[in-house]
Amino acid sequence: MAENLKLVSDLALILISAGVTTIIFKLLRQPLVLGYIVAGFLVGPHLNIFPTVADIANIEVWSEIGIIFLLFGLGLEFSFKKLFSVGSKAFVTALLEIVAMIAVGVLLGFVMNWDLMESIFLGGMLAMSSTTIIIKAFEDMKLKNEPFVDLTMVVLIIQDVVAVVMMVLLSTAAASKQSAGMEMLMSIVKLVFFLILWFVVGIYLIPTFFKKAKKYINDETLLIISIGLCFGMVIIANSVGFSSALGAFVIGSILSETIESERIIKLTHSIKDLFGAIFFVSVGMMIDPQILVQYWELILSLVIITLVIKALVSSGAALIAGATLEDSIKTGFTLSQVGEFAFIIASVGVTLGVMPKHIYPVIIAASVITTFTTPYWIKAATPLYLFLDRKLPARAKAQMDAYSLLGKKSGNKNWRSVIVSTLPRVLIFFVLSFALLVVLFDYLWPFVKQLGIGQFLPQWLHNTILAALSLMMIVPFLYGMVRNKPKTRQMYVELIQENKANTIAVVVWTLFRFILAGFFVFSILVNFFKYTKWVVILITIAIVLIMMFSGRTLRRLTFLENKFMENLNAKEEVKN
């Protein structure tokens, strides 16, 4: 019993200290996150002034749960539709800022004789800004209606997504002991594959379940189901080689598209706050004053890089992306801090043995310092803009405001529209077709074989039945891969009328999609039949052609697509 009470006493110490420090930090009008970190430092093993936590290992388990709930909460407030509706400006800004800061981190890492992997992730951590701190600063400074705020918020969302990807790559690097190369590339491909699969299947199944069971689901049941789905996806993500954080983020983003998302956010808010507090307190426990003294030069370097170089890089990225000079400077200076995601990444990296142990307290120290400077740096952006506005020639300012990296929209609009309308469909249906074949040939048909059903039939008939069933199940996905919607066909006509040379591109793109569909049909047939390849190829072509003129296939595909879009748009329809 005494052993069990150690965990209770540790949690009591953590929560009481966190409560006291947050009250103090509220009086000082400072972010609560800093209060949690200070609380952890005070009750941690490196400072013996106050009572200390007895079992750090147990607290690490709780902090892992804290990361899960933080990412789950982030996913609930995330929207893929909103992300893709903001245009290219935010994407270009975020991409340029992240790449530039990673380059700065690599240079700094090489100066300190770190290896390439450590240097890349140092740069990645420097690229992360604090969504929590910036939102609070906007609220306190009443800036939410400023033009640059929307650009800044979308850049923060993209940074959060990149941070999740970085944690996946950290896991891959730890497993493969490689800093780059084919292993990392395959990890990214695998990540994209599973993200598409989970999102499409999740949007198709989960909202449908909520609709069917709506009258049986009260707040208590919804809370249990939501947390159960969260931990379930964490297990699934781990089982395929990804981090717990990714699984929590994915299921949160799926639930955010359901009509129950606002209820789920309210129900899980307190739980997220509780475990989030435990995580940030555990972060504070890792601060060792001796390490801070030993690496003070590195901490100072990171702070200067964040406040000066990151501000300039982010401002330049926004300007190149097409923002005005004023919005660019304000966005760049707002993003100039090391966010909490940086020490989540550092925590994962240290735990996996990919990052040096001293980077954890160093990043925390840099984050704390730059967090304090955030409101002052946001205020400093306006005087800097006014100074540049006075000094720059009017023509130069006009050119800056009119410039965009992507240029003006021109005759390429149709091509962009075609790519936007067809490439996601091809990618989604390719992933679904591949996943279906894996389920059929690795799980379902071996299970059927174990049941012994085929022993009563001739082998050729048994194989023919399984091949036919496989084709029947996969045909709607293949049809979706090669089918052009009426609007897309009209775009093709306009492209060809605009320039006859576009005919070749249209034909090549269409043939490529037919070849992809034929590949899946071919894969099914060669698993069941031992005919010569040319016979199988002819059969493949025939089946694809038959599939194209099948009204039944079209109806099945239309039903699946309509159901998916109905679930995806249900949240907006309820609001309207």
Image: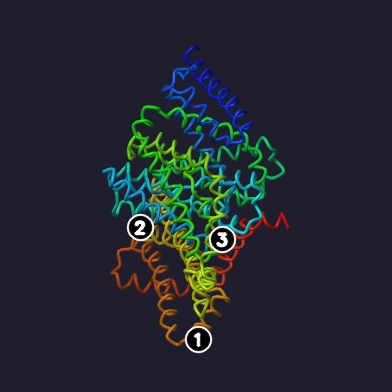
Above/below status of 89 relative to 544: above
> Which of the two labelled residues, at mark 1 and mark 2, occupies the earlier sequence position?
2
How far is the residue under mark 1 from the one under mark 2? Answer: 55 Å
The quadrant in which the C terminus is found is bottom right
Identify residue for label 2: 459
Q: x, y percentage for residue 355?
A: 34, 39
> Which of the two labelled residues, at mark 3 and mark 2, occupies the earlier sequence position?
3
SS at badge 2: helix
Q: Residue at x 29, y 48 (%)?
A: 116
> Which of the two labelled residues, at mark 1 and mark 3, occupies the earlier sequence position?
3
Given contact means CB atoms under 8 Å apart, are the residues at marks 1 and 2 in contact?
no
Circle nearer the viewer, 1 or 2: 1
Judge by depth and name the residue closer to the eye, 499 or 222: 499
Q: Tell me how the rendering is colored.
A: rainbow
Q: Give neighbour class at mark 3: few <14, some 14-19, many 20+ (Cα, 10 Å).
A: many
SS at badge 3: helix
Q: Is residue 272 visible?
A: no
Q: x, y percentage for residue 142?
A: 66, 48
How far is the residue under mark 3 from the one under mark 2? Answer: 74 Å
Identify residue for label 3: 326
SS at badge 1: helix
Q: Give neighbour class at mark 1: few <14, some 14-19, many 20+ (Cα, 10 Å).
A: few
Identify residue for label 1: 498
Above/below status of 485 relative to 96: below
Above/below status of 6 relative to 338: above
Circle nearer the viewer, 3 or 2: 3
Q: Is residue 525 visible?
A: yes
Q: Is residue 20 left or right of residue 188?
A: right
* Numbered-mark total: 3
How far is the residue under mark 1 from the one under mark 3? Answer: 39 Å
Circle nearer the viewer, 1 or 3: 3
Given contact means CB atoms under 8 Å apart, are the residues at marks 3 and 2 in contact?
no
